Structures are given as structure tokens and as C-alpha cells.
Image (spheres, rainbow, N blue to C red):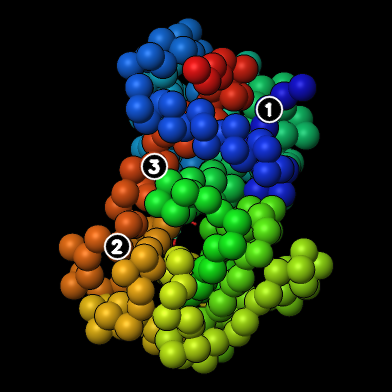
Amino acid sequence: MLRHVLSAGQYTRQSLEELFDLASNIKANPEKYSKSIEGKIVATMFYEPSTRTRLSFETAVLRLGGQVISTENASSNSSVKKGETLKDTVRVLQNYADAIVIRHSDVNSATDAASVSRVPILNAGSGKGEHPTQALLDMYTIREKRGKIDGVKVAILGDLVYGRTIHSLIKLLALYNDVEIYGLSKKDFMLPQEYIDFLKEKNINYTICNSFNDIPKDIDVMYHTRIQQERFEGDFGKEEYIINKEVLSNFSENTIVLHPLPRTGEISEDIDDDPRALYFEQAGNGLYIRMGLLLQAFNKEVVE
Ligand code: NCD
């Protein structure tokens, strides 16, 4: 069976733990994997802008000994300009590459691509839908810091409507026991009902907050996100809920602050040196998770 990464929903607790163990193994001993996918070519097709995701995927391929063919600006490529569908592009690319990493504005892009592909597809962001590899590295970072995920209390902030990393994160958190989620956002960016229903179905308490005061002081994780201005018409103004030194001083010394990045003012630079500010470390973990995902896609994973 092909090992696509399409949605956070495809993971189980066990498959997550396997990936995390693999990523930790790679992180502790990266040289051991430096030739693991020698001879493999991975295509990265980005129809939307990206810095971290594309470069960490490409670094992951190179660190595993593979090679990359890449287009950073796929939406202005000849195939799109000429009206080629994503499916046709995949039908062609699979003749050149052994795996394809795709970021695209359509929520169904990854599943559409997988439906015609005989090589693994890795979803690097599908519109406002999902961003599973980001949520995997988010969960990995939480587990690394906290030791476990059961019982975790997470506040999600920012753009809960269009923030695809949030949607994938919710699906992964739902695999664990005694999880509590708190949402704090401007009115126009509150968590859509379908996700509230999903959490209810999974017996996860979801609390809508109206200010930082409504978030428990001993919250484990504050996960902020950028308002995804490029995904909607109109201007709903700037983020109101900014995590800065003063805000953070009200929370526990064990509270960690995460953000998928890029930040656009929702986390103030005055907390960057606080040991609880883990967003850059989180981005660093993206490399090991993506190396792990590539090893799995090529059935080359070994955990010792
Ligand atoms: C996120 C994305 O593209 O969804 N970025 C990322 O991959 N780290 C978040 C964002 O763009 O705000």
C-alpha cells in the first residue's frame, strides 16, 4: 500500500507514536540516515507561498541522501497557465519523481493527487483544510517537552477558521485521553461548528474564551496562529489577542508557546528569550518529522 500523508485523520495513536520514535531517533543520530533514500527523487510542488515547509522538506530529502526537483511557484508555471489540472500534473510528475510533496489552495488537492498517483503524495497544506505534517511536528514538540500528550490542556488562538494547522492539530489531539481545548479568537475567526461537533463526538471539552483571563493559568500549550488574510475578501482588522511579556507573566512556568510561523504580530518579540517560547525549536523539529515521513513513504524506516 502507498504511504501517502493526506490528512491528520489517517493517524492512530500507535502510528503517531511510531513516527515520533522515528523522529527522535533521527534527531539523536542523523548521520545514521544520511544514505537512507539514496537514488530517490522527490518533487516539491508549491502552488502557494512557503518558506519553512518547502525548505524543511527539501532539507529532509537531502539529509536522507535523496535528490529534489522543485518548483516554488507552481501556480505561475506553464502547466497551470495553460490550464492543466493538478491531477494531470501528477500523472506526468510521477514518471519523474518517486514521491511528490504538494501545497495547493484547494482543500481536496492532496486527495485528488493521491487518487491518480502511483507514488506517495505528502500534503504540505491543502487550502484552508489541513496541514498534517505541521500538526505532526506540533504534537511531537508537545510530547518532547511534556513527556506525554494525555491530559494536555491546549489553547488555540488566532485564525481558527482558515488556519489549516489548527484543523489538523485538533484531529491529532483527539486521539488522546483527557484533552481539554480552549479557543480564543476574534469573533470572525471562531472555530467552525464542524470542528466543535467533531470534538464533542470525541468527548473533548471545548471552551470558548473571551479574553486571556478565561484561559486556565496552568494551560500546557498556547498555540497562536496568523490571520490568513489571503484566504478571504475584506479586512477584519488585526489580531486583538497578542501574547507578550505581560500576558505570559500570568501563566505557569510550564506553559509553552507554539506558533506554526510566520508570525505577524500575534506573538511579541519581547518573549522570544523566555524559555517557554518554543516556536523556533518547533520549526526545527519539522526537519526530523519530515525526514521520518519520507523514510516511511519509502518504507525505509528503522528504529533501533
Ligand atoms: C502555515 C501554513 O502555511 O498554513 N505555515 C507553515 O506551514 N508553517 C501557517 C501560516 O501560513 O500562517
Q: Is residue 199 left or right of residue 266?
A: right
Instruction: Work out whether residue 188 can be spotted.
Output: no
Q: Which residue is mark 1?
A: 3
Residue drawn at point x = 52 percent, y = 37 percent: 20
Q: Is residue 196 above or below residue 11?
A: below
Q: Which circle, 2 or 1, is nearer the viewer?
A: 2
Residue sitting at x 68%, y 44% = 13
Name the residue rendered at 60%, 56% in the picture: 150
Q: Nearer the viewer, residue 63 or 70?
A: 63
Q: CA distance from mark 3 to mark 2?
A: 14 Å
**What numbered label is drawn on residue 277?**
2
Viewer-nearest residue: 249 or 272? 249
* Residue 297 point in image, percent of width and height: 61, 24
- Tell me if mark 1 has few (under 14), some (14-19) or many (20+) residues whose alpha carbon lies within 10 angstroms of its own: some
| Image marks 3 and 2: residues in contact by CB distance under 8 Å | no
Which of the four quarters of the rendered structure image does ligand 1 lie in? bottom left
The spot of residue 169 in percent (x, y) is 58, 57
Which structural element holds mark 2?
A: loop
Q: Secondary structure at mark 1?
A: loop
- Closer to the chain start, of discs 3 and 2, is 2
Q: Can you tell me whether the CB of the residue at mark 1 lies under 8 Å from the nearest atom of ligand 1?
A: no
Quarter holding residue 239: bottom left
